[in-house]
Image (tube, rainbow, N blue to C red):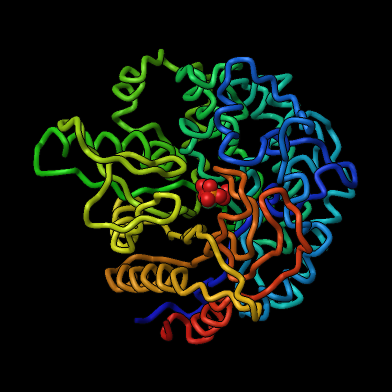
């Protein structure tokens, strides 16, 4: 199996899930800071009277402390370097730079933190890969403006993107505009800053918010390319290979339409620079009136598409609209019909390496732009043995099979530039707010209440991944 020379092996995280220090050095509150830990979080957010208030007497807020990466990043980057990382994907907390989101001037202390973090990466020859907005918009923009359904957000994001691109473009080549932009139906609070009480269940708002995010994404591409045309600015989608349950043409059609709605819609706009042909049907199906657009919007989208596609891949799904009795599984966003050919993780996510090969071929065939797998991995319970070791063979097995599928897709002709497994160091889960759902090569001694020593300890997979990188994917 031959991975290209210069292939970007690394790992991925997001600020709100690991930095902690949620109110330090001028940082404002983000939507993620208002999310309670534990499976309870979605119930709380979707209740009609949830007003984004933070009640520490009632709930634990794990993101507030995270794994304290804010103070321990040097130790963490040193461990990434030891594994041989060529790149590190992280996000910039919008609220460290613009604490409320609508200020005009950036917070210098926030910029200084990321200067230090980036310099630490560069010291080891690790290429930073930055998500501009990863599920952590300022809470003030959600509360005072109603989130992304409000067009004013475009301007606030533009200021933020301009501040960070201008400040860091000489040190950072790879950027992504929004994490998992197509997750809005399932995660409106994190993705678009909207909850039940502010219209998250009204699809008109979700699509209008998307339109604003597409404009914001194009503006970021424009700003970045004006600074340096060689910057690589990508979109970031969650991709789920989706199978028809059977050969029934009705299920096949449902699968196509699911792909259009979930896997393609956002990428079609961000990569091709135009709304796809099926847009009117999709809007109608969702009871959405034509979107509000200003003159010049469509020209902006057309002029500034993204340079590459970053995507997350964890699992595949099945479409079955004809049978009523199919077994179901869980998943952060996907859930749905059980696939009898696949095993599932402890959280019910169906494990499907071949689905990744299909995903790579599908995306590359459709868009012909470079692909970057910026999230993949297995959330699992880990056990620390009495001798301190953590033998996560299940994680090694998952990753090895997915890397094999990547190699096969490269041989299929796909232009894949890198791979950053999710949560390369244990961090707070986005969907459940748990620490015990672990993805890392590095164990962090903290429980779901964020109690513990915080000590970092390499798992068995740490040495394994080190070997994978050193052999450029040959030695699995
Ligand atoms: C993706 C997100 O959905 O999956 C990450 O971009 C998230 O933020 C990751 O953490 C894994 O999901 P979870 O719910 O297991 O943390």
The answer to whether one can see residue 157 in this image is no
Is 399 or 136 nearer to us in this picture?
A: 399
Question: Going 52% across and 42% down the picture, which residue do you hit?
Answer: 304
Q: Is residue 475 above or below residue 335?
A: below
In terms of depth relative to the viewer, which is nearer, 380 or 372? 380
Please provide percent x and percent y for residue 48.
58, 16
On the rendered structure, is 117 left or right of 25? left
In the picture, measured across the screen, residue 341 lies left or right of residue 92, that is left
Residue 344 picture quarter: bottom left
Task: Identify the residue at image location x=86%, y=55%.
Answer: 112
**Front position in the image: 208 or 378:** 378
In which quadrant of the rendered view does residue 394 lie?
A: bottom left
Asked if 402 appears above or below 314 in the picture, the reply is below
Q: Quadrant of the C terminus?
A: bottom left
The location of residue 368, given as percent across then percent down, is 35, 56
Q: Position of residue 151 (x, y in %)?
A: 62, 22
From the viewer's perspective, is 76 left or right of 209?
right
Q: At 61% from the left edge and 71% from the top edge, which residue is drawn?
A: 384
Figure check: 12 above or below 466: above
- Residue at 79 percent across and 69 percent down: it is 74
The residue furthest front is 386
């Amino acid at each position: 199996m031959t991975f290209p020379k210069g292939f970007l092996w690394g790992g991925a995280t997001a600020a709100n899930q690991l930095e902690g220090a949620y109110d330090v050095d001028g940082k404002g509150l983000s939507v993620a800071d208002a999310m309670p830990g534990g499976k309870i979080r979605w119930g709380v957010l979707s209740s009609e009277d949830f007003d984004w208030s933070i009640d520490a007497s009632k709930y634990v807020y794990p993101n507030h402390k995270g794994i304290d990466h804010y103070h321990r990043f040097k130790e963490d980057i040193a461990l990434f370097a030891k594994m041989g990382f060529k790149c590190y994907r992280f996000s910039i907390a919008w609220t460290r730079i613009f604490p409320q989101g609508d200020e005009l001037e950036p917070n210098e202390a926030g910029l200084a933190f990321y200067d230090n973090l980036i310099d630490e990466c560069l010291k080891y020859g690790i290429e930073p890969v930055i998500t501009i907005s990863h599920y952590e918009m300022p809470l003030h923009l959600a509360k005072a403006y109603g989130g992304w359904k409000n067009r004013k957000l475009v301007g606030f994001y533009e200021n933020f993107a301009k501040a960070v691109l201008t400040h860091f473009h000489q040190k950072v080549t790879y950027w992504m505009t929004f994490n998992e932009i197509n997750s809005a139906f399932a995660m409106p609070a994190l993705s678009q800053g909207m909850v039940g009480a502010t219209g998250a269940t009204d699809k008109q708002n979700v699509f209008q918010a998307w339109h604003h995010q597409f404009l914001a994404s194009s503006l970021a591409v424009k700003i970045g390319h004006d600074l340096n045309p060689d910057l690589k600015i990508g979109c970031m989608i969650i991709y789920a290979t989706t199978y028809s349950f059977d050969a029934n043409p009705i299920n096949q059609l449902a699968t196509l339409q699911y792909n259009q709605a979930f896997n393609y819609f956002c990428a079609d706009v961000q990569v091709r620079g135009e709304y796809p042909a099926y847009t009117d049907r999709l809007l109608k199906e969702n009871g959405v009136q034509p979107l509000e657009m200003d003159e010049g919007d469509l020209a902006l989208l057309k002029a500034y598409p993204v340079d590459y596609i970053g995507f997350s891949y964890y699992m595949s799904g099945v479409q079955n609209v004809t049978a009523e009795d199919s077994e179901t599984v869980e998943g952060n966003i996907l859930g749905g019909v059980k696939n009898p050919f696949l095993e599932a993780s402890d959280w019910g996510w169906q494990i499907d390496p071949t689905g990744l090969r299909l995903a790579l071929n599908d995306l590359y065939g459709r868009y012909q732009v470079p692909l970057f797998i910026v999230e993949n991995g297995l959330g699992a319970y880990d056990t620390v043995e009495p001798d301190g070791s953590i033998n996560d063979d299940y994680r090694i097995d998952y990753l090895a099979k997915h890397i094999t599928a990547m190699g096969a897709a490269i041989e299929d002709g796909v232009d894949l530039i890198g791979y950053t497994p999710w949560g390369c160091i244990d961090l707070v889960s986005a969907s459940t707010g748990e620490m015990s759902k672990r993805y890392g090569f590095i164990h962090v001694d903290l429980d779901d209440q964020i109690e513990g020593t915080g000590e970092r300890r390499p798992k068995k997979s740490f040495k394994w991944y080190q070997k994978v990188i050193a052999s450029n994917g040959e030695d699995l």
